[in-house]
Image: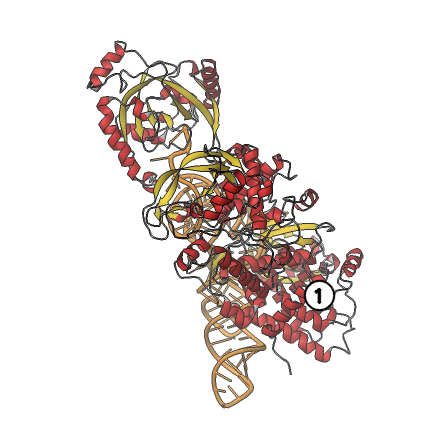
Amino acid sequence: MMSKYDPSAVEPKWQQRWEEAGVYRVDLTKAKKPHYCLVMFPYPSGARLHVGHWFQYGPTDSYARFLKMRGHDVFFPMGFDAFGLPAENYAIKTGVPPAESTAENVRNMIEQFRRMGCMYDWSKSLNTSDPSYYRWTQWLFLQMFQHKLAYRKEAPVNFCPQCQTVLAREQCQDGTCERCETQVIQRPLTQWFWKIRDYADRLLDGLDGLDWPEKTKTMQRNWIGRSEGAVIKFEIRPFETPRQCHGEEITAKRRSSRTITGGAPQGDTSIEIFTTRPDTLFGVTYIVLAPEHPLVANITTKAQRKHIEAYVKEVKTKNELQRTDLAKEKTGVFTGSYALHPATGERIPIWIADYVLMTYGTGAVMAVPAHDERDWEFARKYKLPLQEVVSGGDITKAAFVADGITVNSDFLNSFPTPAAKKRITAWLEDEEKGREVTTYRLHDWLVSRQRYWGAPIPIVYDPDGHPHPIPEKHLPWLLPTDVEFKPTGESPLRHSKEFKERTENIFGKGWEPEYDTMDTFVCSSFYYLRFLAQQRDGFETGNRCHCPPYHDTLLIDPSIERKWLPIQTYIGGPEHACMHLIYARFVMMALKDFGIVSHEEPFKKLVHQGLITNKGAKMSKSKGNVVDPDPLVARYGSDVFRMYLMFMGPYTDGGDWSETGIKGIERFVQRIWGLVSSLSLVERARERGSENSAVLTALHKTIKRVTEDMEQLHFNTAISSLMEFLNVLEEQEHVSRETLKTFAILLAPLAPHLAEELWEQLQGGADRVMVRDSERSEESSRTITGCPSFIFHQPWPHYDPQLLVSRTMTIVVQVNGRVRANIDLPADFSKEEVIAAAKRQENVAKYLGNAKTKKEVYVPGKLVNFVL
RNA sequence: GCCGGGGUGGCGAAAUUGGUAGACGCGCACGACUCAAAAUCGUGUGCCGCAAGGCAUUGAGGGUUCGAUUCCCUCCCCCGGCACCA
């Protein structure tokens, strides 16, 4: 009697055997064909793995297994991005310290990954909240500090008055707190920054050489946002400053008349503006400052002060979303002051408006309404004049923003736009009224967080408040545990007695530690390097010793780094395009400059897995639409579940969740099992007989297709090829054991447990015949010496191109582009022979009749088309 | 608004240096097995036809071509990202 394949018995068996044999271990120093394949590590959440996790980690495990079977020395580690808010929130709610809940979660997740059948080597895992890890996070901070890439500055942070805590940008959804929906306010705080902006050009230029999705590169380019232009200085001619005209009320009209009659200008006041269109300088009709611009208070005239103050106040009440709403009409207020045009000396009114952003350029723009859409709209509303300086459009209807020929611009006249830009920039530099400047949208990286569950910033302050780096010998600078988790609006570390005492003991009375911790993106900016560091035994049990001494003396061994980096395949969600994937590149570049690593780019090839949605919506805990895979895994097993995910569609597309169809994979698995079982009953006598040629051709075609598909992570088509092959096998009366063994090998990355079980069943037969490359064969038999024979250690089969060459060809015969016949002919027929045979077809002759054939198209080996 | 990716049966999808559209799977229908159901197996599954064969068809419209899901133009819709960046 044929038994059903039972994953609940088979899967744990192989998981245990893999583990015991250490099949995933890679010797980092001896590896000959290193391939570092990395999947972005997860946050160790208390919830069970959801469908999204499975989709991210199941298929990528299959890919890594494929690489391994193809003969690569695959390093495929997994760790935990363990610092972060959820554990802290859990602590606030329950009082369980984050270190405890995190350790528990990590243990659970490792157990789940094991049951999934993933080939991670847990002895090489890591946890970013472990002192042995965050000691390096702190070391990185010190490196940044020493190389003057870290600095302190006051900056506004997002603060939720309800939760009494600072929020990350991702936690502010549409300007409100994601937890309590309170309006988030901005609060100034002194923060640590890293100078990622210094690397903007390298981050931009490096993208060209990366094998990344074009979309992601574009997103990074836009995020960095380099624009080339000029800064131009406009002198200000106030007739009155708040001090000069104290108590005096002057109307705008009177001021104008006094300007002309020659009031004394304040020579030391000027505004610098940034523009990408210096060529339109002669078209400037007004200037606009951001409402927060520091000069606003100085240049506002008494008459305008009330209006200006009211406007500034109103702007402050708006959150970022309201302020940047494009649909809204632009607003602004005149300051009362004028600037002098640097070339013509004309008076230019100065306005403020919230469409000008303080955070970009210089926070001030020269408005050229004839050639800029925003200025055009603003000028029309406030009846400000237009001056055309580039010909080619109709500025009464719309701003003309394209390049053209410069007009009405004195010495720039008749220059085309690019030449005019050069000319005016040179002129401005000669006159010391401006200079060529490149600006970026990318801001320096704010790494301070007023949170508990993160790596403490390794800085102490002397009694005068000056920052000093903590010497390396004191690392890890341990996160204190005597803290209050309830949010108070201050950094939780402030309440640790031990933290303060520790600082004073080491550095002296009156010294204070930095109370902020680091952004978790710092932790994940270099984790791929730490995976390659020394073995960390005992990780998976959570029993490793957290006490000093810490043996690592290097972030990474340089020879290992040279050998294994850059990461050949990096897989993770596209949501990291402008965060993690930029930070990691920046840190790698900085480490290269510090002489720590040899490579500039960490990730050579990047792949984004698709998103699995539920009824079209993103799955999230708060929406309560997260699909739990456990019942399906329990019912069908890990292999079936992961294969189903892979079979759903292209891996990079993701898709909407639905479990209809998983039965198809279940049937596939049972049919394979049935085929092999039935073979074992009857095969022994006849298995030596040679395979029939149709099966052999189908087999080699399958090898080719599966190999090519797996290389490109096209799991869905790889599986369908195997299904087609199974259909062929099922039609046969006899199938040789060798064919089934090759089939099992092809299946192994996709259904590892099933394949191992099949392999065991099929053992003891003749030698493998599918491996043509004798060298490879030898090499692989060497590697498996001493191990039980795992299918995972078998070499990947090669196909024989000779076998794919068919002796016949199927010719499609068309008449006027419509298919009329289908004929099988010997492959060596000439064009004439094919056409003659085609004409003989009854159904073709019928259409040809007596009509004149205008043209005969012959596509060799494929098709004939008669055009009448 | 801008940038990117898409739109193919009842459903998930295959196929593109232009050459038989719908592989593979799900679902559905009928049949076999069964007292029955499930499971399993077989057949069918764009439309008309017993069949031979014919016709239609890849978001809509147009173009290039002997031939277009594939190339070009116009438009519609969906998804993702950015969004006053001067």
**Between A155 and A816, which is closer to the camera in this rendering?**
A155
* Residue A508 location (% of width, % of height): 51, 38
Q: Amino acid at mark 1?
A: Phe
**Between A601 and A545, which is closer to the camera in this rendering?**
A545
Q: Quadrant of the N terminus of chain A?
A: bottom right
Mark 1 Cα shell of 10 Å, populated few (<14), some (14-19), many (≥20): some
Residue A647: in sight, yes or no?
A: no
* Residue A731 location (% of width, % of height): 65, 73
Left or right of A651? Residue A258 is: left
* Residue A110 location (% of width, % of height): 57, 61
**Between A654 and A479, which is closer to the camera in this rendering?**
A479
Compared with A316, A410 (above or below) is above
Residue at horizontal 51 percent and vertical 62 percent from the top:
A49
* Residue A771 location (% of width, % of height): 76, 60
**Between A112 and A407, which is closer to the camera in this rendering?**
A112
Compared with B19, A515 (above or below) is above
Residue A617: in sight, yes or no?
A: yes
Compared with A792, A339 (above or below) is above
Give the color scheme: rainbow, by chain, secondary structure or one colour. Answer: secondary structure
SS at badge 1: loop
